[in-house]
Image (cartoon, helix red, strand yellow):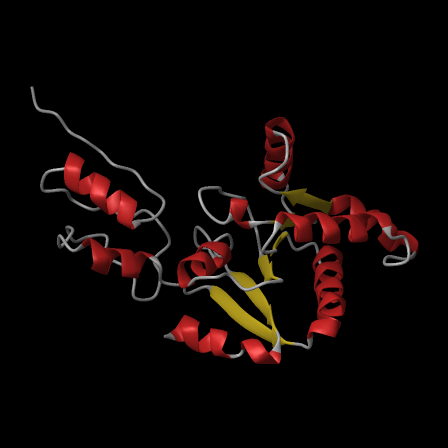
């Protein structure tokens, strides 16, 4: 009998490349993601060059609007607060990325517990702020994940890179990076949480003036 082996992966990393080389013989690539600018032609068979294909798969979706905000470190929280509150008022489902678990917890509790940040009826918006990170109990993580995934709008998730890849959230329209991703791969995975399956999306990364070379790194 003939044996057909199928390897499924959200992205093509060096580890996946090694595994494919060991397990597959004369493989054909089928790309099921959104067609990005410069992305692979799904009608053609794989050329055999994993490096080329990996580069293509990390292309930015064409319906993603990318923005950058330069702000001094001392005003960064004010910018974050304005962005988060605006997203909540406009019913835009949003993921906010931080570099560390400590940052996620710190800002989550500031937004949730400080009544002076939101006033009047806006105080109810704090109930729509969630957090997700790797140190949470597995049951708690599952609960938050499914709650945010199933919500259509009106939720903001504070997260580490634990949600950067491998997870799908429905109808995310906005990505905020309080800290820039440490790599191009990480940046693309983060912004890839929006503008999925033919939908449009927006992303913004907050940078200090000293971090301007980061943009050259991304375009590099």
Identity of the residue furthest to the left in this view: 1
In which image quadrant can residue 34 be found?
A: bottom left
- Identify the residue at image location x=67%, y=49%: 102
Q: Is residue 34 visible to us here?
A: yes
Q: Nearer the viewer, residue 199 or 71?
A: 71
Q: How many marks?
A: 0
Q: Quadrant of residue 148?
A: top right
Q: Establish if 131 lies above or below 204.
A: above
Any part of residue 61 in sight: no
Q: In this rendering, would 154 be left or right of 58?
A: right
Q: Which residue sits at x=42%, y=71%?
A: 218
Where is the N terminus found, in terms of image quarters?
Answer: top left
190 left or right of 26 in image: right
Compare residues 120 and 107 and report the one nearer the observer. 107
Q: x, y (%) of residue 144?
A: 64, 36
Q: In the rendered view, would you say 205 is above or below 195?
A: below
Q: Is residue 42 left or right of residue 166?
A: left
Give x and y (percent) for residue 123: 87, 51
Closer-to-camera residue (119/160): 160
Q: Is residue 169 left or right of residue 29?
A: right
User: Looking at the image, which residue is at 24% across and 56% down?
Assistant: 53
Q: Is residue 61 above or below residue 105?
A: below
How far from the left and from the top, in percent, is residue 36?
A: 35, 61
Tell me what residue is drawn at x 29 percent, y 38 percent. Answer: 8
Q: Position of residue 168 (x, y in %)?
A: 49, 43
What is the quadrant of the C terminus in the image?
A: bottom left
């Amino acid at each position: 009998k003939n044996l057909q082996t199928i390897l499924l992966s959200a992205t093509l990393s060096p580890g996946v490349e090694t595994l494919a080389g060991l397990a597959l013989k004369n493989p054909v690539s089928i790309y099921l993601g959104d067609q990005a600018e410069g992305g692979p032609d799904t009608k053609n068979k794989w050329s055999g060059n994993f490096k080329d294909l990996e580069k293509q798969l990390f292309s930015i979706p064409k319906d993603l609007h990318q923005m950058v905000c330069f702000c001094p470190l001392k005003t960064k929280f004010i910018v974050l607060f304005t962005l988060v509150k605006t997203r909540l008022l406009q019913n835009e489902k949003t993921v906010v990325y931080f570099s560390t678990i400590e940052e996620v917890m710190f800002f989550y509790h500031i937004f949730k517990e400080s009544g002076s940040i939101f006033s009047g009826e806006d105080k109810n918006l704090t109930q729509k702020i969630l957090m997700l990170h790797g140190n949470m109990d597995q049951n708690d993580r599952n609960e938050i994940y499914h709650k945010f995934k199933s919500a259509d709008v009106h939720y903001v998730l504070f997260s580490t890179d634990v949600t950067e890849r491998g997870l799908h959230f429905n109808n995310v329209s906005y990505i905020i990076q309080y800290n820039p991703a440490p790599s191009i791969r990480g940046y693309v995975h983060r912004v890839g949480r929006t503008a999925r399956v033919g939908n449009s999306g927006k992303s913004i990364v907050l940078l200090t003036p000293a971090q301007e070379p980061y943009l050259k790194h991304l375009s590099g």
